Image: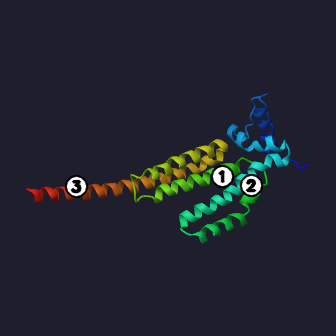
């Protein structure tokens, strides 16, 4: 049998308490929402090492795919997406996070999607009134909220997401101001021609 580390043991104990309805204790090493998400493996496979690490592995694999989509969106090509995916895989982050039952892999998945949607909000400044653009804003907020609820480390990514939103709002407001000035100038010209 594989030996669990301290954080994995606290996850198993917290998952037992939450899923058995016998206790309300949740360890201070994992958040309650992180326990609910990552403890699902213990419901399926029992309190074994595989059960604790199963959900972390799934989120680690999903993060690998998410890195591809994020790099493809930011850098604008399939080649860059595949390259980023290969770099992510070779750096060992996905393998090491997927091999232990930590909630960090689930939180990292949502952090990457928060940045993906924040960048989509930033990059779509051609249509400042488009509802799809604001959907990206809300999805980014929900993704970073899920990440922070799963593991507190994810809140360290919050300033970057906020910065992307602020830069996007500043760019959009300058575009709208230019459109307003142009429309105001056309209106004055029309009124001059009319009189």
Picture disc at residue 108: 1
Q: Nearer the viewer, residue 105 or 62?
A: 62
Could you say whether the residue bearing mark 2 is in a helix, strand or loop? helix
Q: Is residue 31 above or below residue 136?
A: above
What residue occupies the far right of the structure in this picture?
1
Q: Position of residue 37 (x, y in %)?
A: 71, 43
Label 1 Cα crowd, 10 Å radius (few <14 / some 14-19 / many 20+):
many
Looking at the rendered image, the disc whose residue lies closer to the viewer, 3 or 1, is: 3
Query: Contact, CB < 8 Å: mark 1 with mark 2?
Result: yes
Q: Is residue 165 left or right of residue 36?
A: left
Quarter location, residue 28: top right
Tell me the quadrant of the picture where the C terminus can be found: bottom left
Q: Position of residue 120 (x, y in %)?
A: 50, 57
Q: Is residue 8 left or right of residue 189?
A: right
Q: Is residue 142 left or right of residue 19?
A: left
Looking at the rendered image, the disc whose residue lies closer to the viewer, 3 or 2, is: 3
What residue occupies the far top of the structure in this picture?
22
Q: How is the image coloured?
A: rainbow
Q: Which of the marked residues, 3 or 2, is nearer the chain's N terminus?
A: 2
Label 2 Cα crowd, 10 Å radius (few <14 / some 14-19 / many 20+):
many
Q: Which residue is mark 3?
A: 184
What residue occupies the far bottom of the structure in this picture?
79
Q: Which of the marked residues, 3 or 1, is nearer the chain's N terminus?
A: 1
Q: Disc 3 and disc 1: Cα gap in Å?
A: 47 Å
Q: Which residue is mark 2?
A: 97
Residue at 60% in and 71% down? 79
Q: Which of the marked residues, 1 or 2, is nearer the chain's N terminus?
A: 2
Q: Disc 1 and disc 2: Cα gap in Å?
A: 10 Å
Residue at 70% in and 37% down? 32
Could you say whether the residue bearing mark 1 is in a helix, strand or loop? helix
């Amino acid at each position: 049998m594989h030996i669990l580390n301290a954080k994995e043991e606290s996850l198993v104990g917290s998952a037992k308490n939450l899923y058995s309805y016998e206790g309300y204790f949740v360890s201070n090493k994992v958040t309650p929402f992180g326990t609910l998400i990552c403890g699902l493996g213990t419901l399926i496979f029992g309190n074994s090492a595989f059960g604790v690490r199963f959900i972390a592995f799934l989120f680690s694999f999903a993060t690998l795919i998410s890195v591809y989509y994020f790099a493809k969106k930011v850098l604008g090509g399939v080649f860059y997406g595949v390259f980023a995916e290969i770099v992510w895989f070779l750096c060992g982050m996905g393998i090491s996070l997927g091999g232990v039952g930590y909630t960090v892999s689930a939180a990292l998945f949502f952090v990457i999607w928060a940045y993906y949607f924040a960048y989509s909000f930033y990059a779509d400044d051609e249509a400042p009134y488009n509802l799809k653009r604001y959907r990206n804003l809300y999805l980014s907020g929900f993704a970073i909220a899920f990440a922070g609820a799963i593991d507190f480390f994810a809140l360290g990514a919050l300033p970057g997401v906020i910065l992307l939103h602020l830069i996007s709002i500043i760019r959009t407001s300058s575009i709208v101001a230019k459109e307003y000035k142009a429309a105001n100038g056309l209106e004055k010209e029309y009124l001059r021609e009319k009189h």
